[in-house]
Structures are given as C-alpha cells and as structure tokens.
Image (cartoon, helix red, strand yellow):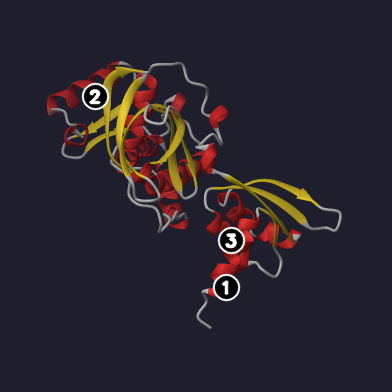
Amino acid sequence: MAARFGVSLRTIYRDMNTLAEAGVPICGNSGVGYSLVEGYRLPSLMFTKEEAIAFLTAEKIIEQLTDSQNSKYFRQGMDKIRAALRAVDKQYLHNMGDSIAVYKSRNTRESLPNLLQMILNSINEKLIIEIDYTNADDNKTRRSLEAVGICYSHPSWYLTAWCHLRKEYRMFRLDRISNIRTTTDKHTKIHPTLESLAGTDAPQCLTEVVLRTSKEVARYNADRCFFMGLINENELTDGGIEQTYMAYSLEVLARWVLANADTTTVVHPVEIKDIIKQIIQNLDV
C-alpha cells in the first residue's frame, strides 16, 4: 500500500489507526494485511452489479479512446471502485472483463500523454495554450489558442478553440498536435459554449453538396454519411432521400457517389460530376 500510494509505512499505519478510531471496522493480520469486516460499505460507494458493469464498460472505452495519462487516472479510480465491492461482485466484474472489448481505429494516431487534462485545465484556469499543429495537407503551424472545449466524433478527439492566428473559432484534431504547452497569459475574451460553436469550423472551407439516393442506401450508410459531412435529409415524393452535405473535399464526396453510382445521383454542384468523369477516364481498364 505504501508503494502503491507513494507514502511511508508509518503513514499507512497512522491512517489505518485513524480509520479504526473513526469507527470503520478494519481488521489487521500480521504478515497478511488489512481488511474490512464483510458487509461494511461506505454509503457513497454502494454500487449495483449493473452500475459496476457500466464503469467497466467506461474503463474499456477510456483505455482505447483517450491519452495514456487520462487512462491511468481512470484506472486508479476503478481500483477504488473495485475495492468498495463485495468479494462476489469483484469476481463478477473480473469474469465480465473479457466479455467487453473496444477497438481503436487503425487510422487514429497516438495523441500526446496528458493532452486532455492539459486542455481541460487551461479551460478551467482560462489560460492560453500553444500547440504545434499539422493539418490534413501536412502543413505545420504554431498556434496560440483559447480552448473552449473538447469533443469526440469517431474516430478522433477534437479541440474547439479561439485561434489567435486565424482570428476565429477553429477545430483541431488532437492526434495532429505534436506539442503543447500552457502559457501564463489569460484568455482575451469570454467564449460561447462548446455546443453553440458546433459546426463553426472554418465555414469558408466547406462546400454544400446535395445528393439523391435511395432510402435503403441512406439507412445502410447512416453512420458513414454523418462522418462525410451530412447535415440534413429530406424524403422525396418518389420515396427517395435528398441529402445535404457540408464537405471539405469534393473529391471525397465524388468517390463516395461513384462507389454508390447505381443508387446515388448528384444534384449540385456540377464540379462533383466533373471529378467523377475524370476518375473514370483515369481508370486503367
């Protein structure tokens, strides 16, 4: 226990005596260790099996989808939760551990350790952060940011912040941040909520694309469509679906349409059709 918490043996002995004097039924066995009398639980740490499984599921998600330091902090919290469970519930949790799995996307790069905690601390303390950032075109810049919040949209985490370089709110993928530091400079303005800034990422870089497809294809590709930039769907009188996208890359949408060419057509812009024609002409068949 002393090694686990980084304290001296004397501190452990003193803390155990303090707990015993406070009425906590602690039993001590020489050469074995300490234990609580069976059945004793702190009221604030009474969990049902269902609640414990929910924590276990969250642990699996956090281990795979956050940085190493955040995962470490959560594991420490889970150790405390496990310690508060009855022996039978601990065994249940142990047995269920191999029945839950979360797999990280192969396309997601490892983010810096402790990145999430640093960003959240800067938000709480209203301090400007500096990052080295590489965008999708492999251009590297150094940005001074006033962080507003972080969000997860599969398969990546994003930071929403006021960018001093661009003088507007921008979103940054966390796995593209190669370096980060917190400055001593305070935020220069009061920022709106994270939710109110949804969709404000460089609107001048987005192009509206309208497609028509079948209801079956729209339903089958629902998740993929969302991550391609889908913002709206309307059912047509003929039973088809009209989809509106806000796209960063017309070529990506063009290839998407080409992959569903037997069910999907382009309403506008015409540039999408031109890109599709060029792709077909370049095919070596």
User: Looking at this view, is 189 or 37 the one in front?
Assistant: 189
Q: Secondary structure at mark 3?
A: helix
What amino acid type is highlighted by mark number 3?
A: Ala
Q: Distance from label 2 to label 3 (Cα)? A: 67 Å
Give the CA separation, mark 1 to mark 2. 75 Å
Percent position (x, y) of residue 205? 52, 42
* Residue 39: image location, x then y, percent: 43, 33
Q: Which residue is mark 1?
A: 280
In terms of secondary structure, where does tag 2 sit? helix
Residue 254: which numbered mark, if any? 3
Q: Which residue is mark 2?
A: 16
Find residue 11 and name its label: none
For residue 276, say whether it is visible. Answer: yes
Label 2: how many residues lie within 10 Å, few (<14), some (14-19) or many (20+)? some
Earlier sequence position, callout 1 versus callout 3: 3
Q: Find residue 158 and report its image quarter.
A: top left
Callout 1 crowding tier (Cα within 10 Å): few <14, some 14–19, many ≥20: few
What's the residue type where badge 1 is placed? Answer: Ile
